[in-house]
Image (cartoon, coloured by chain):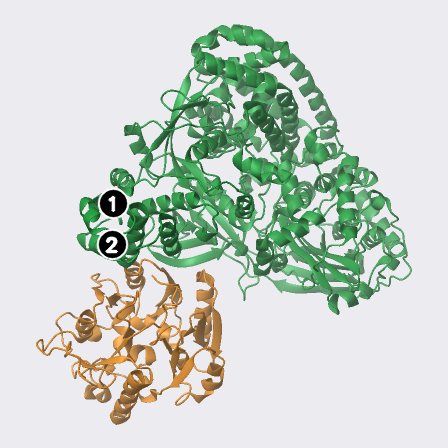
Chain colours: A orange, B green
């Protein structure tokens, strides 16, 4: 189990999936979303991957874009990873279910090392496997499926603090889905947090450190934070940012314990208002990225990548 | 009739059979909820009839006691004074008990030697006449029990008669006296009767004695069995029989058995553990150490399991490895049974530590010989898991068993369900949920999900009624009012069990010392149950005194345990039935008294921990304990915001009306000290006097002396303070009234707050205190006296003017501050006065009012000089109807004479500025308070009265609330405050105590600081009084101030803030 809180952000690998053209065209699940600049979105996505790989030193697995899965890049919704366990979710949107359907579309990952060398693990022998599941499985994670037809869960409704889970009961995630999270990660308390606004839990809050919850200033965000404060056995500091979206940051600790962890955030580029507040976070190296274009499709940092450690217990 | 009744009651007492009880009650209570009654009844009996008390008390008395207690439902109708009488009887019994003990011990030994069928005659011969008589009586009881398991009607009737009488009595006082006289007479009669009976009984008894075997399943899966022998009850001389079983009396209390088991296990840090028995497959009950085993078990087989009751949040703080070992065993059971869910990885990790602890370093060869499937690492164990376990086991090379256990615990303690005791329930909408009681509070789960959490500091009150369980919670950040949340449990017993567990957990983890059980008489309304063991703080303290070489113990293989578990995950007990392994080893008598608190108080934790005492000694302790219990009942202490009380509101209401009058009288009576020089009393300290005072009369308000500056706290102790402390100690004695402080109470108070020396020490020792304060100030126990006071006031109030407590009320955020009821001192004069008031209250309320008025007038004259200026910090207790806060910064030196000190000091300086309705404020009080202060310090400068604003309360679910009228009145004397606010001296101590009773809540915050060589003690009290309508504010304030003055004669009042909120509508809970 490791030391509580210390496990937060431990990672060695990051998984992303390329932006398909279908995202920009507004097809599929993207229907109703404002048109977005595909090139810009792809550029943002590319930058994100670059930062993960080069700045943070993670081994980056990039799944190729899949046109049939316009929201494929938002793979953060499709899995909840803690330690050596990955729970494959059951997204609320039926249109996104193919993203997690075993054997469904997905393509195979290109695994790039720090130097960009393809990893031998990425075998192209199975052309049409579900990307995320397969990738995670290949990385040695225990895969847990959500078999319950009544359960819905978007991965970005789950906040792991290092000590416990909070699952936002939002438009996308129901009680049953949360229960499966609890069932999967039994070592941890799993609390449900009602999410009042039409967004995911993670779209307005995140972890700024092992003991710090970062949240936006909207009512929904603050309300959720208060709810979490009530539910937790552990005291967290909370940092409020002007922008909800800026709170969707990633606390990552790719290196050894002695190395300063990173905070991947949007305060630098597209959400400058929150930059100042984020500076208050100590003991963390701020790494700004932006994804304002991808945000139009509902993406945030938490949904654009999955991070994991292949040696969670060492 | 007397005799008859007596025997009947005896029978009742003795009969184990629930059914019998129920039968008895039915006739009486017919309409009432029988379930509740019976269970309540049961409990009542248990609690009241401590062995020693019983034995000694004559039949008559017993009957007396029994009847009221017996019928819970009935008890509603019984005026409190009756109950009081009960306690009186008990006390007597106790005295007798002390005398008797030695003899008894002798007898017991004999019995033991001679085996069960010792001829009764023989014993008699050896004993004195008296003793013989007592002896006989016991015998008789046994006899009766055996012979007449079923209840006889006579008993019932008399009880009813009594009740009727009581109801009719309006002028209680006299009656009360009569009663007591009667009681006395009865006692004498009883003795005679007893003797008569005894003779008859002897023969029967001889045949009837038999022993009961009880079996305890230990954590390692072995079974330990004891014989509980009938005749020698409260037996501590344990005879080890060939089988390895031990005899203890069938009437022995849970503690006896528990102590034996711990002794057997060589376990010193035993406060984390307990014995449980299985009432049904789903229902596990904890054996209450303070009650007779038999009564708790009823007809259940004497099968117990030894379990961890309070999971230490940080096992590394345990002193001994052996304790950790037992904790490990428990956790392994919990894990294997699924009670403690873990992930696969954790199962493997914990399993690997188990292997390391039990098998040592991984050895491939040896490993081959072990079949891992013998171990149970998880509820459902897979090959994969076993492989993982082995893999991890290899990495633990070099860890000693103790280290492996420690690692095991370090990982296990982080599991989210570690130490969470789950109870099935339904929420208000009928949805299935689980309530998890843990160290931090109450967790609400739906399925596996935590959907809500109520930390202890957030919970103001816990209660149950029938099968409903309620918690009253502090308003959330943005909310203004408290809310009560109800849960539906499967049945009444489940609700009660949950309630008890909550009380225990709260006390254990949150308090520094246990609260005193409420006095029977007063709290007829609910269970008197309180956790009587040591708190975590105390047990840690005690653990530091352990100085024995680390005991050698065998780590039994979990194989064994796991096998057991395989069969009976659910009911370990049941398995034990089938199993028949006699407990190994020697069991030595463990003589510690049941009340650990008392021991702690003595400062003799060690003895407590270690030394086996001999029977006689034990008896003594028992006797004391009894007395404690009895006397302690007078005190209803609530230290924390958490009102751990089980008040049945309905009952309460009924009672209030009926009992009001008698209650008043009772109070009156109580106030009269009954000098009973016994050891305990002598030791008794201030708190007692406080109690008394409270009883006497300060009704309405809980006064609080609040130290304005919570932040200032000082650190050094001055000689002066010591002197004070000493004085305080003395004072009570001289005052004499001490009717019933129990040691436990005393000790707790002392430890915490009352005695300053101790207080400080405590603070030093116990960080918890402070921490808690910071967290929520829900602190500690210390305020016993205050509580009492509150309680009484409540009753009175209720009776008089206030109807039930309206939900709207009682505690405010301020309770965060915590309350404390500091040393109250009662002057005799005061007492009388109050008494009078009480009496008058019912009949002559008007007159009282007039009195108040007069006082008011007096105020200005009296007070001023002394008052250090208090800055007015308005007390914002919005929620409450009435709040009175007194700030009394001053030097505290308590002299006996203090109370007598002049009340009338300088009035001149006082300037009252009245902004609003002055009339409401009882100015009169001020002077009195002022009088108390020795150091002429403060001048009361201004009185600010801010005025009523209308407010609409938000109604909560259960508590429909109403419109309120709010009024705030502040008096302050600026002078002093400069000090407080400005330069903060060195913090000596700071403490916060909260206590509440039904309609009042008192929060006391005390800080001691040293500034420039002068020590200053500030006490800030907040009193919240809740009631329906018609509280006489002036009077209440006056009382509060008076109380404050009395309690702290040498302190001056610097600020008084009255905040009043009146509901325009009546809310009903």
Residue contact at pointers 1 and 2, CB within 8 angstroms:
yes
> Tag 1, which secondary structure?
loop
> Dot 2: what SS?
helix
What residue lies at 64% left-to-right and 41% top-to-bottom?
Answer: B747
The quadrant in which residue A79 appears is bottom left
Residue bearing mark 2: B389
- Residue at the extreme left: A125
Q: Is residue B424 left or right of residue B921?
A: left
One can see residue A256 in this view: yes
Residue at image location 25% in from the left, 52% down from the top: B362
User: In this figure, which residue is indicated by the disc labeled 1?
Assistant: B375
Q: Position of residue B361 (x, y in %)?
A: 28, 51
Which quadrant of the rendered structure holds the C terminus of chain A? bottom left
- For label 1, the crowd category at 10 Å Cα-Cα, with few meaning under 14, some 14 to 19 and many 20 or more, is many
Kindly identify which chain the residue marked by label 1 belongs to. Answer: B
Q: Left of B810 or right of it: where is B492?
A: left
**Rounded to the nearest whole Å, what is the CA distance between mark 1 and mark 2?**
11 Å
Q: Where residue A152 sits: x, y (%)?
A: 26, 66
């Amino acid at each position: 189990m490791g030391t509580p809180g210390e496990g937060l952000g431990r990672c060695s690998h990051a998984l992303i999936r390329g932006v398909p053209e279908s995202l920009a065209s507004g097809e599929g699940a993207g229907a109703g979303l404002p048109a977005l600049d595909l090139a810009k979105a792809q550029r943002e996505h590319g930058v994100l991957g670059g930062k993960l790989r080069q700045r943070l030193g993670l081994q980056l697995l990039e799944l190729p874009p899949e046109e049939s899965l316009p929201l494929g890049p938002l793979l953060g919704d499709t899995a909840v990873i803690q330690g050596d366990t990955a729970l494959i979710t059951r997204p609320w949107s039926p249109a996104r279910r193919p993203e997690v359907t075993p054997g469904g579309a997905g393509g195979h990952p290109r695994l790039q090392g720090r130097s960009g060398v393809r990893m031998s693990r990425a075998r192209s022998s199975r052309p049409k496997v579900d990307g995320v599941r397969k990738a995670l499985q290949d990385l040695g994670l225990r895969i847990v499926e959500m078999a319950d037809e009544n359960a819905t869960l978007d991965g970005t409704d789950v906040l792991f603090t290092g000590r416990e889970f909070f699952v936002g009961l939002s438009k996308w995630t129901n009680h049953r889905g949360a229960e499966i999270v609890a069932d999967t990660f039994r070592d941890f308390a799993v609390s449900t947090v009602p999410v009042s606004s039409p967004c995911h839990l993670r779209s307005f809050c995140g972890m700024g450190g092992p003991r710090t919850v970062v949240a936006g200033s909207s009512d929904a965000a603050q309300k959720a934070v208060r709810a979490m404060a009530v539910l937790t056995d552990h005291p967290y500091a909370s940092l409020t940012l002007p922008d909800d979206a800026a709170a969707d940051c990633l606390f990552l600790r790719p290196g050894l314990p002695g190395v300063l962890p990173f905070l991947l955030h949007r305060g630098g580029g597209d959400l400058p208002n929150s930059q100042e507040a984020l500076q208050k976070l100590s003991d963390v190296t701020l790494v700004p990225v932006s994804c304002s274009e991808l945000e139009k499709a509902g993406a945030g940092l938490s949904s654009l990548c999955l991070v994991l450690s292949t040696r969670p217990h060492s | 009739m007397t005799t008859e009744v007596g025997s009947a009651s005896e029978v009742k007492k003795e009969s184990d059979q629930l059914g019998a009880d129920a039968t008895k009650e039915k006739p009486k209570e017919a309409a009432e909820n029988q379930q509740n009654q019976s269970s309540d009844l049961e409990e009542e009996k248990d609690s009241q009839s401590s062995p020693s008390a019983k034995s000694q008390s004559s039949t008559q008395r017993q009957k007396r006691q029994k009847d009221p207690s017996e019928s819970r439902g009935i008890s509603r109708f019984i005026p409190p004074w009756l109950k009081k009488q009960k306690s009186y009887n008990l006390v007597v019994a106790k005295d007798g008990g002390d005398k008797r003990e030695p003899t008894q011990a002798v007898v017991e030994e004999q019995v033991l030697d001679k085996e069960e069928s010792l001829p009764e005659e023989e014993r008699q011969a050896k004993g004195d006449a008296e003793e013989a008589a007592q002896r006989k009586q016991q015998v008789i009881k046994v006899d009766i029990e055996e012979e007449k398991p079923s209840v006889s009607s006579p008993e019932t009737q008399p009880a009813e008669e009594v009740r009727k009488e009581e109801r009719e009595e309006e002028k209680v006082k006299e009656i009360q006296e009569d009663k007591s006289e009667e009681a006395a007479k009865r006692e004498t009669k009883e003795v005679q009767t007893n003797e008569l009976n005894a003779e008859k009984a002897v023969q029967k008894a001889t045949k009837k004695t038999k022993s009961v075997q009880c079996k305890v399943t230990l954590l390692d899966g072995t079974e330990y069995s004891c014989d509980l022998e009938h005749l020698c009850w409260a037996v501590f001389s344990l005879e080890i029989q060939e089988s390895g079983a031990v005899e203890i009396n069938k009437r022995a209390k849970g503690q006896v058995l528990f102590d034996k088991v711990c002794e057997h296990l060589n376990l010193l840090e035993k406060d984390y553990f307990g014995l449980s028995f299985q009432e049904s497959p789903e229902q596990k009950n904890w054996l209450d150490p303070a009650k007779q085993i038999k009564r708790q078990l009823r007809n259940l087989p004497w099968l117990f399991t030894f379990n961890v009751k309070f999971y230490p949040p940080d096992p590394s703080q345990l002193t001994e490895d052996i304790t950790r070992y037992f904790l490990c065993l428990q956790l392994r059971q919990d894990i294997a049974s699924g009670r403690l869910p873990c992930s696969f990885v954790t199962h493997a990790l914990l399993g690997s530590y188990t292997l390391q602890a039990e098998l040592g370093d991984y050895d491939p060869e040896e490993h081959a010989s072990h079949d891992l499937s013998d171990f149970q690492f998880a509820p459902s164990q897979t090959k994969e898991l076993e492989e993982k376990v082995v893999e991890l086991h290899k990495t633990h090379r070099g860890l000693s068993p103790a280290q492996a256990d420690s690692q095991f615990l370090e990982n296990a303690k982080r599991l989210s369900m570690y130490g969470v005791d789950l109870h099935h329930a339904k929420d208000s909408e009928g949805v299935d949920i689980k309530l998890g009681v843990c160290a931090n509070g109450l967790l609400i789960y739906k399925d596996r999900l935590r959907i809500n959490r109520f930390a202890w500091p957030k919970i103001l009150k816990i209660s149950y009624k029938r099968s409903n369980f309620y918690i009253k919670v502090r308003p959330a950040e943005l909310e203004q009012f408290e809310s009560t949340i109800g849960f539906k449990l499967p049945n009444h017993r489940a609700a009660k069990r949950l309630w008890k567990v909550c009380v225990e957990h709260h006390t254990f983890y949150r308090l520094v010392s246990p609260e005193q059980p409420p006095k029977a008489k007063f709290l007829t309304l609910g269970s008197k149950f309180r956790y009587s063991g040591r708190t975590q703080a105390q047990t840690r303290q005690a653990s530091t005194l352990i100085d024995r070489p680390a005991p050698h113990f065998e780590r039994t293989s979990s194989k064994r345990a796991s096998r057991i578990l395989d069969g009976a995950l659910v009911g370990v007990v049941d398995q034990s039935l089938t199993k028949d392994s006699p407990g190994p080893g020697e069991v030595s008598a463990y003589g510690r008294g049941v009340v650990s608190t008392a021991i702690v108080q003595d400062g003799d934790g060690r003895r407590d921990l270690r030394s086996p005492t001999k029977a006689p000694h034990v008896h003594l302790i028992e006797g004391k304990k009894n007395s404690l219990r009895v006397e302690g009942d007078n005190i209803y202490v609530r230290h924390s915001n958490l009102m751990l009380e089980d008040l049945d509101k309905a009952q309460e209401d009924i009672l209030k009306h009926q009992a009001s009058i008698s209650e008043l009288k009772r109070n009156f009576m109580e106030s009269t000290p009954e000098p009973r020089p016994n050891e305990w009393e002598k030791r008794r300290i201030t708190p007692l006097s406080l109690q008394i005072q409270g009883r006497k009369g300060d009704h309405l308000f809980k006064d609080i002396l609040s130290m304005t500056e919570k932040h200032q706290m000082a650190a050094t102790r001055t000689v002066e303070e010591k002197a004070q402390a000493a004085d305080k100690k003395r004072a009570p004695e001289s005052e004499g009234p001490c009717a019933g402080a129990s040691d436990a109470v005393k000790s707790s108070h002392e430890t915490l707050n009352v005695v300053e020396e101790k207080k400080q020490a405590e603070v030093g020792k116990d960080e918890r205190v402070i921490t808690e304060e910071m967290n929520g100030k829900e602190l500690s126990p210390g305020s016993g006296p205050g509580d009492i006071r509150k309680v009484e006031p409540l009753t009175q109030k209720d009776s008089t003017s206030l109807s039930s407590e309206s939900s709207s009320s009682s505690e405010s955020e301020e309770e965060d501050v915590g309350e404390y009821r500091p040393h109250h001192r009662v002057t005799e004069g005061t007492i009388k006065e109050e008494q009078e008031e009480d009496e008058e209250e019912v009949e002559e309320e008007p007159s009282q009012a007039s009195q108040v008025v007069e006082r008011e007038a007096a105020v200005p004259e009296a007070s001023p000089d002394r008052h250090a200026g208090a800055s007015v910090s308005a007390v914002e207790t919005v929620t409450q109807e009435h709040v009175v806060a007194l700030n009394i910064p001053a030097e505290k030196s308590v002299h006996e004479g203090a109370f007598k000190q002049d009340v009338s000091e300088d009035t001149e300086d006082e300037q009252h500025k009245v902004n609003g309705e002055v009339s409401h404020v009882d100015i009169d009080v001020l002077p009195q308070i002022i009088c108390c202060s020795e150091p002429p310090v403060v001048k009361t400068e201004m009185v600010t009265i801010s005025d009523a604003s209308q407010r609409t309360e938000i109604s909560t679910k259960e508590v429909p609330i109403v419109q309120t009228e709010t009024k705030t009145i502040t008096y302050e004397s600026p002078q002093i405050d400069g000090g407080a606010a400005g330069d903060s001296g060195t913090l000596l101590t700071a403490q916060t105590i909260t206590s509440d009773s039904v309609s009042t809540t008192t929060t006391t915050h005390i800080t001691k600081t040293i500034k420039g060589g002068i020590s200053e003690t500030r006490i800030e009290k907040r009193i919240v009084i809740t009631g329906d309508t018609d509280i006489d504010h002036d009077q209440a304030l006056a009382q509060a101030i008076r109380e404050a003055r009395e309690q702290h004669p040498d302190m001056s009042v610097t600020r008084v803030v009255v905040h009043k909120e009146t509901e325009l509508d009546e809310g009903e809970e």
